[in-house]
Image (tube, rainbow, N blue to C red):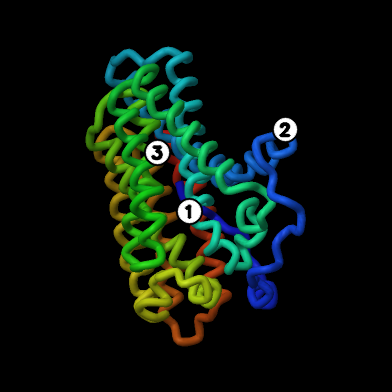
Amino acid sequence: MSTAPVVTSSSAMNDAVPGDEDPRAPLGFSPAALPEMVSLTKPRVTVMVVATMLGGMWVASRFLREASGEVPGAGQLALALLGTVLVVSAANALNMYIERDTDRLMARTRNRPLAARRLAPEVALWFGIALSVVSVPLLFVAVNAATGALAALALVSYVLVYTPLKRRTSLALPIGAVPGAIPALLGWTAVTGRLDVPGMLIFGVMFLWQIPHFLAIATFRCEDYRHAGMRVLPVEKGDRTTRIHIVVYTALLVMVSALLSQFGVAGPVYLGAALALGAGFFALGAAGLRASAGLGWARRLFFGSMVYLVLLFAALMAGF
């Protein structure tokens, strides 16, 4: 339940001022508003987040079969997927509702439906509430209590804790990484019905990965965040501290990813891949400590982090 914004130029950022909104009257509930309501769910972000849920589900299914356990039927797993899509969409819509004023101040967000005043705020509010009311009970009743409870925790912590804290403290990032990592755990609990060590390690991988990923974004968009009053680490503590945090969290990520091979989730081929990928990702992060490393390094780290995660999950799902 986190964002992966598109890179924008500094000139575009300087143009991000209130008053550039769409001159048309905001749309209320109507068929014409449907495309804008879909935009509220941040479809690209939702797809990325749900992909981690499917990865957790795949790994849990294989783990349970090898332990001679019974894997839930396709119908239950399909409902788990649907519930996850809806709860992530709800969180994104409510996040846009709360941040609609701040979004107008940032180049990467000023064209969102509420920031550009193409859609009435109450539409986003009730849309997000409706998705929440459907998704969480669906996961509780149709899947299992563990999955429903985790989904509720992710939704509440993302919307009511992480989102308001972004304007107050840079600690919002590790707090927001919790709901951001929960979808992978939803995939695990949808299959197993319980929290156990392998599932928590997958959660740990996703939690730790988000920190360098988003600190890279905050580094090359620092002035954009500063202008909007967002208390990201580069704004609050400075560039050098941010780069040290990136190195520390990347090192922890490599260690946790390697531990998965010790709990029957994956074999030696995965371990080799995790260490090789981790070494490359760590080296890319550590390169930021050089005095000559500029914003181009942060952009490379951002894109490199996504390549790392895709390849790591591919190796984990292969399971060898």
Residue designated by label 2? 31
- Ranked by sequence position, the earlier of labels 3 and 2 is 2
In three-dimensional space, the C-alpha distance between marks 3 and 1, rounded to whole angstroms, equals 25 Å
Camera-nearest label, 3 or 1? 1
- In this picture, residue 220 sits left or right of residue 165: right
Which residue of the protein is positioned furthest toward the bottom in this rendering? 291
Q: Residues within 10 Å of mark 3 (few under 14, many from 20)?
A: many
* 170 versus 190 height, above or below: below
- Ranked by sequence position, the earlier of labels 3 and 1 is 1
Q: In which quarter of the image is residue 164?
A: bottom left
Residue designated by label 1? 98
Name the element at disc 3. helix
Quarter holding the C terminus? top left
> What is the number of the mark on residue 184?
3
Q: What is the three-letter code of the residue carrying label 2?
A: Pro
- Ranked by sequence position, the earlier of labels 2 and 1 is 2
Return the residue nearer the eye: 16 or 179. 16
Q: What is the three-letter code of the residue carrying label 1?
A: Ile
Q: Contact, CB < 8 Å: mark 2 with mark 1?
A: no
Give how far across and how far down residue 267 sits, in percent.
Answer: 34, 37
Name the element at disc 2. helix
Residue found 53% across the figure and 80% down from its top: 294
* 236 versus 167 height, above or below: below
- In this picture, residue 108 sits left or right of residue 182: right
Name the element at disc 1. helix
Residue found 58% across the figure and 58% down from its top: 5
